[in-house]
Image (cartoon, rainbow, N blue to C red):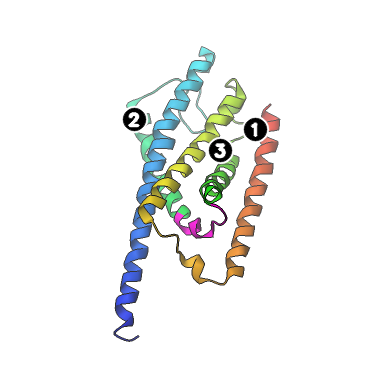
Amino acid sequence: MTVQEQPSVLSSGVEWARRLGVAALAGGIAGLVAGGIGGRLFMLVLARLNDPRATGVTSDDGFIIGQFTLAGTVNLLLVCTVMGVIGGLVWVAVRGLRFGPLWWRRVSVPLGATLVIGSMMVHSDGVDFTLLDPPLVAVALSLSVPLLATVLVTWLGDRWIGSDQTIWQRMPAAVAWIARIGLALFAGWALADLAVKVSQIL
């Protein structure tokens, strides 16, 4: 490595570290807002909509329906913030695979994340979707958490990072397209799985 190359490598490393830090911060904020605060509000809505007999039942996430304790709320906020940080790092890893017009670049990642995470959150035999009514509201509120979180992390991350140039642009185009196809197939599988679960719930 020449003397001229060293500053370039160093600045590149600093930039990657900055992007990871920004993505983690954006993800943490998104997780806190969407999963922590939003999730708590959604639980409140579902509790208010349902029969008092549902109060006291343990939900699929391990929380007591209708009971809002300080310890439970703090635990939810911390867990969602940590999960948001992880989500932010995943987001920054795939953001360079976005393509097409601006509106699609902003919609594709939240849409894909909602399908994939939603298929893991929704269970046809889960308490949240069999005991609580109406079930479609429970499904919609569950899906709104990853949707809102990914919209937030995309908006914050793009504003703070700025440049769309990522490691994917340095690879052969075929590599990026193989990754895009793989992610699209994964999202398609998640959509089919989610559709089956919702039909079973209904």
Q: Residue at x 47, y 43 (%)?
A: 151
In percent of width and height, residue 124 lies at: 65, 32
Which is more toward the observer, 93 or 196? 93
> In which image quadrant can residue 178 be found?
bottom right
Residue labelled with disc 2: 71
Q: Is residue 93 magenta?
A: yes
Marks 2 and 1, the one that precedes in the sequence: 2
In percent of width and height, residue 132 lies at: 57, 22
Instruction: Judge from the rendering whether residue 106 lies leftward or rightward of residue 190; answer left or right.
Output: left
In percent of width and height, residue 183 lies at: 60, 55
Instruction: Judge from the rendering whether residue 163 lies leftward or rightward of residue 182; answer left or right.
Output: left
In percent of width and height, residue 194 lies at: 65, 39
Which is more toward the observer, 61 or 6? 6
Q: State if disc 3 and disc 1 touch (CB < 8 Å).
A: no
Name which residue type carries label 1: Ser
Name which residue type carries label 3: Met
For label 3, the crowd category at 10 Å Cα-Cα, with few meaning under 14, some 14 to 19 and many 20 or more, is some
Residue labelled with disc 1: 124
Q: Which region is colored magenta?
A: 92-101
Quarter of the image with the N terminus in it: bottom left
Which is more toward the observer, 80 or 127? 80
Total marks in image: 3
The CA distance from mark 2 to mark 3 is 23 Å
